Image: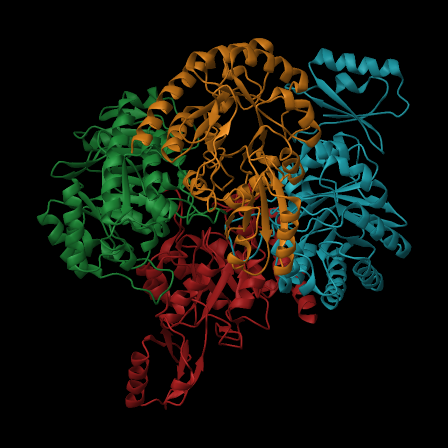
Chain colours: A green, B orange, C cyan, D red
């Protein structure tokens, strides 16, 4: 159950609500976010809402039966639109395209990508500066220096940045230089990291775990929301199955399922979803048709020379074609 | 390696080719289909094609390195179009829609469905008369009598029939009353059944196994082709994964992968692919955008009253909406 | 619900039971097996057993809530012991070892294997004469002639035979030459085959499907039982998962789970379960410790020269070592 | 390739080696551990070892073709034995048993468990004080205070402690109160955490990821080793598959595979591996027979009242029985 408190609630009224809940045998977690104050109320019995609704200071009460609550669409009819500033949003009403290299490699590479995106009207750039690598001997990214350089270039061009944060200690360092903190598939259940990202006033995009369920992804989002941050995007990026013909199995079903279960925007990552360059486009278009609010994909001026994962990276001509087809596909879907 | 023989090859020339192959250490399987005579040549060494090409009676030689050969797109540039007669085809250039109930239940139900399909311009109807059921105590279908009844109604309406065959002994019984023999997911590697369907001059649609790989699906198609039948359709219908939010995981990746690897038409089954009625439409449209040549889905005049699997069955209004959106989606894709 | 009828029940009493069930809204399937007459009663309501128990001709009534019934341990306290004759049984009280080659290749190979098994006191030999192959161009076994040859040799040595049956039409041909019909993993849900094997008075060993669930395996066994054959063995042989370090993932959990859920004997196949020769032994011993009633594994006089699957085939020295360790492991388990 | 340097190598000789490697086109990572100095040399070409072997200061050179190197058994013939002090070791020659509750709940519970373990001669106790929970509203453990209390009790009893560390900032806090840092399944690829644990002189036990591969588990261990800590244990705890009859699928195959690939001790967690209390014992015994060096399982004085996961927790009588059978099983295995 979610109680929405009035912003003007008095201390006395707040105590009265808490006492009443205690009496009824419930435990409440108070959540302050950018948008309001919520109490998530958990208990074993179901409650007669009339016993609570007449108390002063309560704006609204929502019965939510899912185990995740704040991210559930059962209580929030309007879909969340994540505002990145400068008129750039992620969520209903727009197709958000996020593109860029696997890793930021150099100033020249960053600038070339920015120029390419700008020419397409793409306003969000992806890129890694801290790279999770299965081998400890592999390139792990340019780090915070690289991020600062990239951010300066992107800002000048009016382009927003999404980049992966791997641990709590990086949050403060990265904070002023990213617009969306990305939580990678391997950190999808790093609960401490999610907790800390809940305390930040920046958007957070959570990738589904490599073998995470749809429900676990929503729980991870619940962590961020419960810690105080409503600006959350969830991302389907393919799951691990027995099939070896593609790198991952893009779980296209997850897209309408997530759109049904949560009010948060849902983005699709076709690059990791199939992992084979020549098939990124059809999977991207399929994801839009299935209901995705946006795409995040890899592009590089010379995919053959990219650090790692070049096998799934589009060149700029392919990226341009995809952006145009994606917009037409989105327009058709919206016309239905 | 595939040798295409001239239709006019003499017996002596044929023996000369065979002797030459033997000398080179190869084993050849002769395949007669509706369209031609092929020799699939398997051996451990690679061969210098010039040693064979000058022999009389050989029309063409194709080097195919995949383990499946006749169904591979490496030797056959033109995509196979399966002709069902009366101007109805499955394959490139058309979006084939196959719709109908899980099970044929009665004459009235069959007729209502036919009327519905006809009004939408849908010309292929699906329906089961032999149903594979995990429990031996469940309804197993109306059997051959039901098929005859259904076929008579469909024929009058100019509608083709696709229906599942479960065992070799049913092939002869069903032969005159189906246009496409469907091999179900549980029979996807029933090699005897595939062998026998290779001897029939009717189309065969092979569903991917419940946990079959893309490669295994192509091998199953190779069985049918190698036994003499080129009229093959392959169908992606969702695979078994750890995810429990949907009944199966629609492997959208498989669609462009299959289109790349084989010249056969590729059909998508969104009903089984997600297994939840309200999400059949987005998955169907996604599959088209990913490259599918057709759809097969379940519809029923009263899904709540359908035998089994009603949870994934569209009512006629939903079916009508899907057909219209599917055609628009296909038109957009073809415009790219 | 399962009704056991008295063998002496009169026709009138039988009709009275049927009428009563009908009146209560139930559907009954009558099952005659080697051991008795059962009525499997399926209905939507639960029934007050006292309404039935007083009717003449009923020996016993069992409430079974699982969807599979006859194979459930909920009604049959004593474990089934499958008797192969000549004092050879499979089930509680014995560790059954079934060993032999993937394929029967020649008289000399069959005789060498028989000699090897006899020296170890192993009394059941495995071997394929009809081989399911993903490629239509691969060796498919010696067929019925090979089976006859093998059977003659085995019979002389007092050794029983387990061999795979792939289709209904082979049942009659194989009947006199096998002691256990094996249903392979790919045919695990070939319901027609299971139905027909239910009409035969020979033991049937059903392998779990490549991605079959424990529950589906029990349903497949239910098919055989419901068609009249109680002599059933189920076999865990590894499942398909994302892990690529081994050919399959031996589902060791399935062994105690099956032993809990069914009264049928449970055999383990470590050869397919891991698919790597050097690790067949530890997996076999683990399976015994987990509760398996027997082992089926591959052995060959020269594994390097065996048709197919030689990678998981033990040579005779390895086979001998395994048999000895398996017996000691079983003895330790039984001492607990 | 791994170069082992002599501990007495001079600065000049070290520079000479580095220069030579650079000249040959290699990149070297220097690793200082408790036991020695290694250079892990990575490059695209293979090298002629004779070009390096004559340089002064090099103790040994090992060609390792796996992508993980330091944890590979290809260069280190002797198995690693992790010494916890006071004569307590994990690895070859001992069956290590680690038992205890899911969560440390109270002083009384900790003391009861210690008394139980002591009576069985079990010298390592498991317990969580920081609990990863999918829901943010669930109990997250007693934290560092709970750990200090527990440690004081355990130390008095001569019992070592293994407990999960969830983030880098907890390492320093926990350091003096644990004997083995456990990395949980959800953190199995938290590379920053692994890096930092490589700088600590305490044992680290890494659980396999929920859908991690055997290879990924070894890579995670490589992170710890490459950062300077050789005291590593790897743990198989079940993987996520489609099967729903058990909570996870215990990958029994992984045990002999890991023993073949790495010199590190391999421990099995049957509690999570099957997730059903009554089957923990057979899975534990199976894991020993498959080659495990130890067990970690859950036990509680009253499993029904335990925080979370009580479904897989043994009571003390079951725990006692398991310990005794485990030792007999281990003794049998060692006798082979």
Q: Is residue C85 left or right of residue B308?
A: right
B31 relative to C171 in the view: left or right: left
Quarter of the image with the C terminus of chain B is top left
Left or right, B165 with reference to A110 = right
| Residue A113: percent from left, percent from top | 18, 51
Q: Position of residue B52 (x, y in %)?
A: 55, 55
What's the residue at 74%, 20% (across, down)?
C28
Q: Residue at horizontal 40%, vertical 78%?
A: D47
**Which is more toward the observer, B327 or C79?**
B327
Displayed quadrant of residue B102: top right
Can you say whether B326 is above or below C207 in the image?
above
Farthest left residue?
Answer: A156
Can the viewer see residue D137?
A: no
Percent x, y of residue C10: 89, 17
* Residue A327 screen position, x and y as percent: 24, 33
Residue B167 occupies quadrant: top right
In the image, residue C158 above or below residue B313: below
The image shows a total of numbered marks equal to: 0
Nearer to us in this view, A18 or A75: A75
Near-viewer residue (D318 or A162): A162
Q: Can you see residue D249?
A: yes
Q: Is residue D197 left or right of residue A123?
A: right
Q: Residue at x 28, y 45 (%)?
A: A297
């Amino acid at each position: 159950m979610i109680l929405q408190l009035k912003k003007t609630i008095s201390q006395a009224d707040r105590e009265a609500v808490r006492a009443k809940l205690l009496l009824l045998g419930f435990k409440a977690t108070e959540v302050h976010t950018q948008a309001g104050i919520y109490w998530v109320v958990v208990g074993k019995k179901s409650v007669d809402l009339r016993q609570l609704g007449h108390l002063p200071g309560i704006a609204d009460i929502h019965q939510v039966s899912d185990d995740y609550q704040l991210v559930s669409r059962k209580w929030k009819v309007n879909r969340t639109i994540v505002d990145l500033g400068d008129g750039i949003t992620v969520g209903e009403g727009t197709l958000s395209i996020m593109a860029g290299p696997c890793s930021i490699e150099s100033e020249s590479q960053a600038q070339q990508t920015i120029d390419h995106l700008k020419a397409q009207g793409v306003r969000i750039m992806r890129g890694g500066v801290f790279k999770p690598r299965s081998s400890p001997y592999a390139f792990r990214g340019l780090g915070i220096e690289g991020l600062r350089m990239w951010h300066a270039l992107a800002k000048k061009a009016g382009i927003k940045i999404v980049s992966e944060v791997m641990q709590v200690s990086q949050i403060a360092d990265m904070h002023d230089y990213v617009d969306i903190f990305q939580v990678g598939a391997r950190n999808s259940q790093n609960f401490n990291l999610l907790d800390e990202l809940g305390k930040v006033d920046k958007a957070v995009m959570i990738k589904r775990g490599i073998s995470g369920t749809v429900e676990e992804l929503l729980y991870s989002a619940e962590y961020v929301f419960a810690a105080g941050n409503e600006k959350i995007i969830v991302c389907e990026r393919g799951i691990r199955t027995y099939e070896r013909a593609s790198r991952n199995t893009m779980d296209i079903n997850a897209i309408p399922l997530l759109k049904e279960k949560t009010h948060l925007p849902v983005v699709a990552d076709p690059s990791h979803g199939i992992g084979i360059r020549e098939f990124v486009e059809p999977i991207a278009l399929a994801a839009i048709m299935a209901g995705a609010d946006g795409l995040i994909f890899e592009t590089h001026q010379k995919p053959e020379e990219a650090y790692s994962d070049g096998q799934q990276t589009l060149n700029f001509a392919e990226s341009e074609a995809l952006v145009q087809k994606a917009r037409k596909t989105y327009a058709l879907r919206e016309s239905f």
